[in-house]
Image: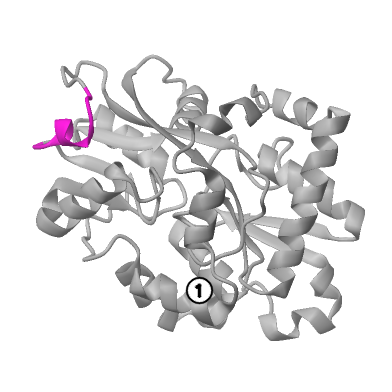
C-alpha cells in the first residue's frame, strides 16, 4: 500500500503548483491540445477522474458510472464520442486545466476552481465522516475530531471551502502528522482498510461513494458513519476555453431533455439512485453563487487562480 502522508502548506495551490511544471509527454493522452480542433480527435471528448462510484466507475464496464453514461448519451447526439479513463484526482484536475483532457468527472465547484461548469447540476453529494465500527466518537462538527488522525484524499473538497475544508487545511498546516493524505487511483478503498486496521481514526468521504464502495468490498455495516450536513453540487468540470464552454452547454441542454423524457430516471435507477433535483435546496451556498465565485472565463486566469489559492 502506497501511503502519502505529505503535508502541503495550502490545500490545493502547492500540490498543483508542483505538478504543473512536471507535465510532459508522458501525461498526454494526445499529441497536443493545441491541435485538437484541427484533427479528427476533436470529436472525441476525453474525461478522467479517480474511481468514484456511482458517479464514475470502472472504464469499459457495463456500469461505468452514471455521469459517464449521461455524457455519452448526451454528447453522441452532437457527433462526439466519449473516452473515459481513470487516474489520481490531482492529476485529472491538472490535465483539465492544461487541456490534456476535456473534463474532470465528479468535481465540486471547490475541486474545479477555475474550470468551466454547466448551469445544470449532475448530482448532489453529501459528505460523511466514518469511524471504525467500535469507535465511541460522536461527530458534532469538525472540532469534535481534534486529537484524532484523519484520512482524506488529495485535492478533494468536502464542503466547497466551508468549515470542514478550512478545518482540514488548518490541521494539515499546523499538525501535519495528524492527517493522512492519499493520492492514488483507489484512495478511498485504501483509507477504508486503514480505518479498519486502526492506522487512522476517521475519514471524510462522499456518502454515496462510501456506501457504494463498502458494498463492493462486502463491508456494509462494518463502519460507523455520521452525517456532516454538508451537501455539494457535483458536475463535470470542463477545460477553461471555448471548447469547454460548448461542452458544458451541450450537457445542460441534454440533461434537461433526459429529465423531461424520463431517460435520466432510468439511468439513475441502474445505480440505485433517484433524481437529485429535490435536494438542491440543501446545498449551501446556492449553486449559482458558488459557481460564479470559483469559475473564471479563460485558461490564463484559471491557472493564476489555481496557483494562488
Q: Secondary structure at mark 1?
A: helix
Answer above or below: position of 125 versus 180: above
Q: Which residues are magenta?
A: 139-147
Residue 237 image offset from top left, x and y in percent:
59, 58
The magenta stretch spans residue 183: no
- The image quadrant of residue 267 is top right
Q: Is residue 196 left or right of residue 91?
A: left
- The image quadrant of residue 207 is top left
Give the residue at mark 1: 302
Q: Is residue 78 visible?
A: yes
Callout 1: few (<14), some (14-19), or many (20+) C-alpha neighbours within 10 Å?
A: many
- The image quadrant of residue 34 is bottom right
Q: Residue at x 57, y 78 (%)?
A: 299
Residue 63 image offset from top left, x and y in percent:
70, 35
Residue 268 image offset from top left, x and y in percent:
71, 28
Q: Nearer the viewer, residue 131 or 77?
A: 77
Answer above or below: position of 198 versus 1: above
Q: Residue at x 67, y 54 (%)?
A: 118
Q: Is residue 64 visible?
A: no
Q: Residue at x 68, y 80 (%)?
A: 33
Q: Nearer the viewer, residue 191 or 169?
A: 169
Residue 110 image offset from top left, x and y in percent:
44, 54
Q: Residue at x 17, y 21 (%)?
A: 137
Amino acid at each position: 500500500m502506497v501511503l502519502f502522508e505529505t503535508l502541503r502548506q495550502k490545500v490545493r495551490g502547492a500540490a498543483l503548483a508542483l505538478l504543473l511544471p512536471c507535465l510532459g509527454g508522458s501525461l498526454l493522452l494526445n499529441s497536443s491540445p493545441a491541435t485538437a480542433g484541427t484533427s479528427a480527435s476533436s470529436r472525441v471528448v476525453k474525461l478522467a477522474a479517480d474511481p468514484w462510484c456511482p458517479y464514475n466507475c470502472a472504464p469499459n464496464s457495463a456500469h461505468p458510472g452514471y455521469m459517464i453514461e449521461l455524457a455519452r448519451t448526451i454528447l453522441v447526439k452532437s457527433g462526439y464520442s466519449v473516452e473515459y479513463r481513470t487516474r489520481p484526482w490531482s492529476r485529472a484536475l491538472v490535465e483539465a486545466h492544461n487541456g490534456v483532457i476535456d473534463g474532470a468527472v465528479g468535481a465540486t465547484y471547490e475541486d474545479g476552481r477555475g474550470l468551466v461548469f454547466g448551469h445544470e447540476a449532475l448530482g448532489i453529494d453529501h459528505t460523511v465522516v466514518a469511524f471504525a465500527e467500535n469507535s465511541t466518537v460522536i461527530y458534532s462538527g469538525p472540532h469534535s475530531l481534534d486529537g484524532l488522525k484523519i484520512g482524506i484524499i488529495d485535492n478533494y473538497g468536502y464542503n466547497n471551502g466551508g468549515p470542514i475544508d478550512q478545518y482540514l487545511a488548518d490541521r494539515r498546516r499546523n499538525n501535519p502528522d495528524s492527517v493522512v493524505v492519499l493520492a492514488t487511483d483507489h484512495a478511498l478503498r485504501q483509507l477504508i482498510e486503514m480505518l479498519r486496521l486502526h492506522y487512522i481514526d476517521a475519514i471524510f468521504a462522499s456518502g454515496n461513494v462510501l456506501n457504494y464502495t463498502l458494498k463492493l468490498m462486502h463491508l456494509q455495516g462494518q463502519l460507523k458513519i455520521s452525517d456532516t450536513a454538508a451537501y455539494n453540487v457535483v458536475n463535470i468540470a470542463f477545460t477553461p476555453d471555448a471548447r469547454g464552454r460548448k461542452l458544458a452547454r451541450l450537457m445542460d441542454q441534454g440533461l434537461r431533455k433526459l429529465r423531461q423524457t424520463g431517460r435520466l430516471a432510468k439511468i439513475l435507477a441502474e445505480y440505485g439512485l433517484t433524481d437529485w433535483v429535490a435536494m438542491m435546496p440543501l446545498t449551501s451556498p446556492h449553486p449559482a453563487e458558488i459557481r460564479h465565485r470559483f469559475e473564471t472565463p479563460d485558461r490564463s486566469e484559471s491557472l493564476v487562480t489555481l496557483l494562488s489559492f
